[in-house]
Image (cartoon, coloured by chain):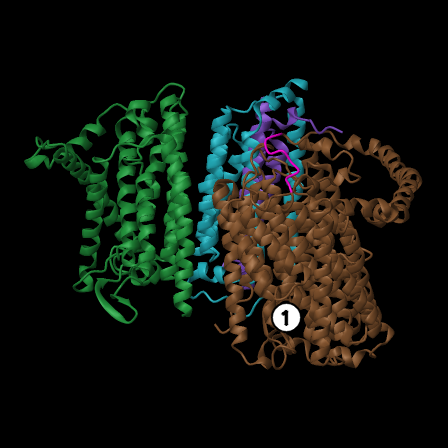
Chain colours: A purple, B green, C cyan, D brown
């Protein structure tokens, strides 16, 4: 059996890569992909804990996270396409309509 | 070395490797002769004789074809995304081969590479990956016909995957397992209804609530393998040759291989889900024979359909998938669930 | 053998995830993301979550990433141009935050600074496979969230369709105003 | 399954509503009418089946309770959605579904050319659902749901032609006046919950004798509150004002809701709660007096009205008064009996009036009718039967029930009320035959082929706003010959006519047959024997009958004399008693009185509150908060750069802080 720490460490690395992706990149689509990476890092932690605790609840949570991710991607991509139609760009540092 | 041979894990791995080797070898042969069969059948359907020059009855034709393809020029269009252009054909073949590892060709564990308990899910997962090869091939060619073909095929495959996945659910409801060999097991024995035994095998197709899923699955299989009457991605009249317009030589051969392998895989799945898998009269060892018989009959049916029916229009195809097949399969899931629940509690 | 497989998948996962972030071409990024999701599915299999592993491929690789690819192809995106002082500053901050986060997370994992909750003595019944076990829990204890999820998906679907269909005239007018 | 599935009875119209909502636009008129009538017809069949099952049992066991589900549960208190069928609700269910079915069929013809055909049947079916819930409920709370439901449908249907100002006003008036009554009812139910801890009839009635002192103040208050609810729904003094205005709705609605079924809900509720009412003699006195006063007052107003539907509306109010004073003198069975016969003949009268209006191309003023007997033979014959029935001539239905009520009033020593009832009967006979004579006899007072110029014709009417036309959206011309209505209207008329004649025979009692009447026997498991009923001797009964028949005959004779043979008499009387006529014609100025004491003060008070409290205090507070927030947010907005990256960075800092927290702990 794989120690839970291994999975957690892997999850942490994956999450950090996702964070870096969000902070470093300016293409909205890549940022979105980085968010998916972070979600998957969380999923990995869920599955690892589920394995450690002999419980299925963690896997159920992953199931729900995936559903949420699917819904999020559908809506998010629709927003990105709309933004592209409006502003002809997907670079987030060229879009600041919500500036206070 | 001897110690290694005693190691159980190693033995399993070794056996698996041997089976994989056999399957890969046989598959390649079967595919090349499937192409030959297609050409022959097509010829006879069209009142021709088909290939008959190379070898007796043209039996050596596939070998000649492979030789020709090997020596053709590798062509990469200008402005193509080279890496993806090279990877795409591999992606087209890979899912079919992976799926084959879970198909029970006879009673397990002898005739199946690995009998995992989520075999059907693996099949669905791999068929959803099948989109990539075609889409990327079309996109990386930097050619509008190829791109349109690729997009069409991926839209088509995604649409029909839904109905296909849903039409397997009544089967799962009946068998209560996702394991393919478990599904085949549940179709063994004789058909019983209300305590009377009928002279029918207990295959899925003979249960009334699986008849509609069978046909939905069959139709979706045509769409999933991009074969007529759903061969829109390579509609020659509109798209030249669709997503593989720019491919030549062995890369084109890989697409071709992928298509025929997909056909074999999906026919195997139909046999497994609906036609009782390896079950048939005689001793268990005959299982693989029965399996192959059913498989070849289905393959013949696929070829027969291809050369009989005209191609659909694109909007008709999408409308049919979303407005007819999907609701029908959902309705069937409900009906089968209610029926099985009622029967279990009656 | 399992630990080696785990390490292999982990290495693949980290490498592909890094490529997602580093590669300048969005299509390549997406393809690497597919690969990293697939290796994550492998890790799930090793953690005895077969169902989740397969669903991971079906949902993420088979559906979500195809959608990403479609959008990238639809928008016809090429290599991202990332030059200039501002971007360099941003990159520096990003990597620094990332390094700090990794450090902290590593410390937490090493110190055991997480409380995973009580371990159930009896492992869940795996009779009929992982999928059946999950189904049993999902349709009993988590039935209500499960049904709510379906509404969420419906709403997302309607939302996406409405947004994509849009009103071309209104869009154009708004675009010109800015 | 042993039970006859009571839930299906209200569920059928509800299903029709759902189907109509979902697919109505594809069904077309034929489909819609088939759906609506079919659902109600099926409900009728289901009701018959249920009642037959009930009747097959021995009298003590005639009670079926069917719990669909528990609606809610709060502590010890729980309310179920459950249905009760006993002899009392059986009568109501049969009347509601049966008469309702006939009126649905009638509406097909009557509404045929209305553009909102579908909406009409939608509301009508919704009403059927609510009404059936009301009568089948086995607790006060579910009854209240139906009670509010029928109120809502009544409002929707009165204002059905909502493009007409008077119709929407009438709808609002009905709704608001009903709210007052509903408030009383709700308070009464809360009272019962507070004291008995339950809303279930059986439990409340079982607990009542132990909890309340008979004649005590608590039970009196509770029953008075319930009765307030009844006065609202059943149009009794002081809340009767909405019913005459409700005639703005389409005529089938007036027949179904404002004559046959909904308005009798109050009577049903009082009878249903007879256990409580019998414990509160003071309340019963109030009920009796109010009922008698309403019967008398409405009858006097009905004497002088000219709009055919208005006469019928006041007649309805008057007849409801009879039912209430029957309850008030303790003759609950007689009250329900009158509910039933009244449903038959009053529905018939309204439908007949509708047929006349339809035939006359939406003319409602009786002064412009006359001589229709030959032109509309079926309508004429059925209307005549119904008029005789309501006037109280044996052996028609109305006689038996009205006579029983009067006899019970006399027998219990309520001589004043008996006299009022008798006087009311005289006036009923008079104004009903006035209506009959003016409409069907004499010479036609209209030109067949001319346009009517109806707007001018009614300009002088003091109630032009409530004027007589429900002609919206009807495209068939205003001229044209007067002719008989289509079969879908005449068939229900004929069936109801048969019922108006024979429907009362189930109540033929003591002097004619040995033992109690069939009706009384049927209701006995629910109502008991009636504790203080002393029976009159047979000669006394016959004397009373003779008296009431004589009175009715005199009224009829007067009507024929004054309106057919010598119209000068009517004019002379009107001029002689101009003041009285004016008072009656203007309905004792009750509407104006309510306007002066309630509506205007409330309106002005609300205006003041609005000016001061709303504009100064509330708005001032809100604006003040707004100004403060504006100042603060001007600072905060500096953080809102609008760039996603900045926000992401802030989030990342937050995550880092969280990590630090975990590290420290």
Per the picture, the main secondary structure of the magenta-coloured stretch is loop
* Disc 1: CA contacts within 10 A as few (<14), some (14-19) or many (>=20): many
Residue depicted at x 40% and y 36%: B319
Query: Can residue D607 be seen in the rendering of this structure?
Result: yes
At 74% from the left and 73% from the top, the residue drawn is: D408
For the question of whether residue D200 can be seen, the reply is no
Q: In the image, B280: left or right of B80?
A: left
- Quarter of the picture containing the C terminus of chain A is top right
Residue closer to the observer: D327 or D47: D327
Q: Which residues are magenta?
A: D443-450
Inspect the magenta stretch and tell me whether residue D447 lies in it.
yes
Which residue is tagged 1? D88
Residue D576's place in the image compared with C22, above or below, is below
In depth, the one of B255 and B127 nearer the eye is B127
Is B341 contained in the magenta span? no
Furthest toward the front, the residue is D565
Look at the picture and state if B219 lies above or below B12. above
Percent position of residue A60, x then y = 54, 56
- Give the percent coordinates (x, y) of residue D579: 88, 46
Quarter residue D328 falls in: bottom right
Disc 1: host chain = D
Q: Position of residue C130 (x, y in %)?
A: 45, 60
Q: Nearer the viewer, residue B263 or D331?
A: D331
Classify mark 1: helix, strand or loop. Answer: helix
- Point out the residue furthest to the left here: B56
Residue D409: % across, % down? 77, 72
**Above/below status of C101 relative to D38:** above
Q: At 72% across and 50% down in the image, what residue appears? A: D311
């Amino acid at each position: 059996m794989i120690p839970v720490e291994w999975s957690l460490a892997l999850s942490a690395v994956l999450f950090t890569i996702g964070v870096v992706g969000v902070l470093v990149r300016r293409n909205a689509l890549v940022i979105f992909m980085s968010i998916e990476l972070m979600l998957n890092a969380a999923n990995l932690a869920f599955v690892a804990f589920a394995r450690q605790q002999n419980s299925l609840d963690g896997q159920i949570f992953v199931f729900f996270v995936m559903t949420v991710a699917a819904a999020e991607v559908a809506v998010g991509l629709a927003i990105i396409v709309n933004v592209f139609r409006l502003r002809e760009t997907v670079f987030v540092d060229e879009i600041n309509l919500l500036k206070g | 070395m001897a110690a290694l041979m005693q190691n159980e894990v190693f033995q399993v791995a070794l056996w698996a490797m041997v089976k994989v080797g056999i399957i890969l070898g046989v598959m390649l042969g079967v595919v090349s002769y499937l192409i030959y069969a297609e050409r022959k059948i097509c010829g006879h359907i069209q009142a021709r004789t088909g290939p008959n020059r190379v070898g007796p009855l043209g039996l050596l034709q596939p070998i000649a074809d492979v030789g020709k393809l090997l020596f053709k020029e590798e062509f990469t269009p200008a402005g193509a995304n080279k890496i993806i252009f090279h990877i795409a054909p591999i992606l087209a073949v890979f899912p079919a081969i992976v799926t084959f590892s879970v198909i029970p060709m006879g009673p397990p564990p002898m005739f199946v590479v690995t009998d995992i308990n989520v075999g059907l899910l693996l099949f669905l997962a791999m068929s959803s990956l099948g989109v990539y090869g075609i889409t990327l091939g079309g996109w990386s060619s930097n050619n509008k016909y190829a791109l349109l073909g690729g997009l069409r095929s991926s839209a088509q495959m995604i649409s029909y995957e839904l109905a296909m996945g849903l039409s397997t659910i009544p089967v799962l409801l009946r068998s209560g397992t996702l394991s393919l060999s478990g599904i085949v097991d549940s179709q063994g024995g004789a058909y019983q209804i209300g305590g009377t035994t009928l002279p029918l095998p207990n295959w899925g197709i003979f249960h009334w609530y699986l008849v509609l899923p069978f046909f939905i699955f069959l139709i979706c299989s045509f769409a999933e393998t991009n074969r007529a009457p759903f061969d829109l991605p390579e509609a020659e009249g509109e798209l030249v040759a669709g997503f593989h317009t720019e491919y030549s030589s062995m890369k084109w051969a890989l697409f071709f291989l992928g298509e025929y392998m997909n056909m074999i895989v999906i026919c195997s799945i139909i046999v497994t889900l609906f036609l009782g898998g390896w079950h048939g009269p005689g001793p268990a060892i005959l299982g693989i024979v029965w399996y192959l018989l059913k498989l070849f009959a289905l393959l013949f049916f696929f070829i027969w359909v291809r050369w009989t029916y005209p191609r659909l229009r694109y909007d008709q195809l999408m409308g049919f998938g979303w407005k007819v097949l999907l609701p029908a399969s959902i309705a069937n899931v409900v009906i089968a669930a209610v029926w099985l629940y009622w029967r279990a509690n009656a | 053998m399992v630990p080696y497989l785990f390490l292999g998948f982990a290495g693949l996962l980290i490498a592909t995830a890094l490529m997602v972030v580093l590669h300048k071409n969005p299509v390549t990024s997406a393809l690497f993301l597919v690969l990293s999701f697939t290796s994550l599915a492998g890790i799930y299999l090793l953690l005895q979550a077969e169902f989740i592993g397969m669903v991971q491929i079906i949902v993420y690789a088979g559906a979500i990433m195809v959608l990403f690819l479609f959008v990238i192809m639809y928008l016809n995106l090429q290599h991202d141009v990332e030059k200039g002082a501002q971007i360099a500053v941003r990159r520096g901050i990003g990597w620094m935050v990332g390094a700090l986060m990794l450090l902290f997370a590593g410390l937490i994992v090493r110190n055991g600074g997480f409380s995973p909750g009580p371990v159930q003595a009896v492992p869940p019944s795996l009779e009929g496979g992982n999928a059946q076990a999950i189904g049993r829990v999902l349709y009993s204890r988590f039935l209500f969230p499960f049904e709510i999820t379906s509404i969420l998906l419906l709403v997302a679907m309607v939302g996406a369709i409405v947004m994509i269909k849009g009103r071309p005239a209104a869009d154009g007018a708004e675009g010109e105003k800015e | 399954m042993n039970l006859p599935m009571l839930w299906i009875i209200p569920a059928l119209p509800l299903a029709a509503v759902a189907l109509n909502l979902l697919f109505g636009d594809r069904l077309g008129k034929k489909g819609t009418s088939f759906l609506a009538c079919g659902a109600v017809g099926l409900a009728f069949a289901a009701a018959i089946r249920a009642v037959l099952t009930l009747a097959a049992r021995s009298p003590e066991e005639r009670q079926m309770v069917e719990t669909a589900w528990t609606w809610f549960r709060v502590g010890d208190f729980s309310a179920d959605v459950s249905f009760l069928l006993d002899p009392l609700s059986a009568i109501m269910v049969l009347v509601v579904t049966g008469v309702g079915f006939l009126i649905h069929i009638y509406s097909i013809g009557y509404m045929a050319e209305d553009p909102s055909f579908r909406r009409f049947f939608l509301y009508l079916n919704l009403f059927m659902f609510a009404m059936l819930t009301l009568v089948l409920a086995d607790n006060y709370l579910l009854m209240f749901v139906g009670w509010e439901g029928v109120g809502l449908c009544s409002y929707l249907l009165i204002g059905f032609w909502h493009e007409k100002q008077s119709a929407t006003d009438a709808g609002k008036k009905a709704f608001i006046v009903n709210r007052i009554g509903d408030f009383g009812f709700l308070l009464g139910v809360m009272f019962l919950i507070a004291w008995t801890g339950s809303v279930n009839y059986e439990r409340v009635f079982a607990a009542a004798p132990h909890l309340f002192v008979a004649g005590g103040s608590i039970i009196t208050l509770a029953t008075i509150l319930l009765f307030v609810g009844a006065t609202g729904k059943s149009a009794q003094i002081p809340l009767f004002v909405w019913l005459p205005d409700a005639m703005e709705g389409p005529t089938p609605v007036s027949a179904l809701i404002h004559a046959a079924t909904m308005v009798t809900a109050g009577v049903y509720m009082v009878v249903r709660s007879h256990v409580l009412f019998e414990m509160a003699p003071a309340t019963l006195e109030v009920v009796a007096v109010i009922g008698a006063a309403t019967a008398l007052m409405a009858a006097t107003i009905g004497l002088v009205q000219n709009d055919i539907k208005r006469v019928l509306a006041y007649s309805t109010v008057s007849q409801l008064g009879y039912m209430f004073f029957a309850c008030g003198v303790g003759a609950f069975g007689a009250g329900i009996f009158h509910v039933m016969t009244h449903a038959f003949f009053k529905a018939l009268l309204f439908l007949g009036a509708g047929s006349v209006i339809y035939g006359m191309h939406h003319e409602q003023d009786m002064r412009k009718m006359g001589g229709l007997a030959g032109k509309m033979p079926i309508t004429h014959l059925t209307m005549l039967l119904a008029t005789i029935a309501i006037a109280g001539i044996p052996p028609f239905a109305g006689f038996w029930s009205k006579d029983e009520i009067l006899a019970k009033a006399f027998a219990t020593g309520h001589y004043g009320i008996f006299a009022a009832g008798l006087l009311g009967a005289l006036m009923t006979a008079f104004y009903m035959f006035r209506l009959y004579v003016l409409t069907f006899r004499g010479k036609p007072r209209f030109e067949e082929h001319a346009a009517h110029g109806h707007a001018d014709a009614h300009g002088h009417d003091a109630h032009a706003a409530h004027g007589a036309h429900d002609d919206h959206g009807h495209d068939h011309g205003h001229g044209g010959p007067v002719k008989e209505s289509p079969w879908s209207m005449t068939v229900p008329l004929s069936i109801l006519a048969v019922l108006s004649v024979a429907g009362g025979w189930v109540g033929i009692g003591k002097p004619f047959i040995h033992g109690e009447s069939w009706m009384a026997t049927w209701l006995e498991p629910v109502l008991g024997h009636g504790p203080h009923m002393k029976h009159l001797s047979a000669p006394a009964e016959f004397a009373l009958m003779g008296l009431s028949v004589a009175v009715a005959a005199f009224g009829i004779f007067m009507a024929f004399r004054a309106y057919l043979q010598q119209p000068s008499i009517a004019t002379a009387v009107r001029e002689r008693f101009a003041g009285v006529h004016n008072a009656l014609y203007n309905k004792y100025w009750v509407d104006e009185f309510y306007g002066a004491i309630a509506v205007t003060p409330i309106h002005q008070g609300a205006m003041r509150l609005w000016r001061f409290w709303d504009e100064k205090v509330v708005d001032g507070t809100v604006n003040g908060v707004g100004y403060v927030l504006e100042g603060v947010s001007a600072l905060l907005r500096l953080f809102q750069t609008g760039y996603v990256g900045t926000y992401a960075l802030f989030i990342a800092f937050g995550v880092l802080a969280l990590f630090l927290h975990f590290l420290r702990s």
